[in-house]
Amino acid sequence: MINQFKGKRLVICINNKGNEASLEQWKVYQCLPDENAERHNEIRVIDEEGEDYLYPSGFFSPVSLEPSIAKIFIMQNSKNAQQA
């Protein structure tokens, strides 16, 4: 099981309070490493359009997938972001 692929981690949104327009609760998102954000208890999440934004890290929980599924998930999300 892996929880990251090519430096991108997978997380699931467990709380979108105050961010309902930009985060879908129970949706799996990709996130990027950001040490500065982590020091402030934030996480850098990639949205459907391929843009990344900071959110409170408590809004998310790590996700682990089989390597082949994680690769497909990340590649599909990247493809969808390019089409948007």
Image (cartoon, rainbow, N blue to C red):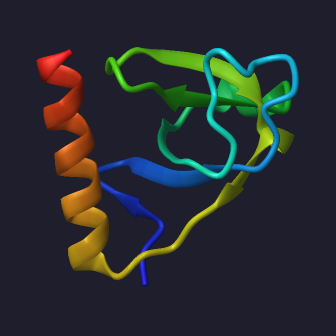
Percent of width and height locating residue 84: 21, 15
- 33 with respect to 70 (left or right): right
Looking at the rendering, in which quadrant would you find the N terminus?
Answer: bottom left
Q: Is residue 79 left or right of residue 7?
A: left
**Foreground of the two, 81 or 56:** 81
Closer-to-camera residue (60/80): 80
Q: Residue 52: image x %, image y %?
A: 47, 18
- Quarter of the image for residue 69 reads bottom left
Above or below, 25 relative to 84 = below
Judged left or right of residue 54, residue 10 is: left
Residue sitting at 73 percent across and 24 percent down? 55
Residue at image x 65%, y 15%?
Answer: 21
9 up-or-down from 78: above or below: below
Identify the residue at image location x=33%, y=17%.
Answer: 49
Q: Residue at x 45, y 25 (%)?
A: 47
Q: Classify 35 as above or below 10.
A: above
Answer with left or right where residue 20 lies relative to residue 77: right
Q: Is residue 84 above or below residue 57?
A: above
Q: Position of residue 82 (x, y in %)?
A: 14, 21
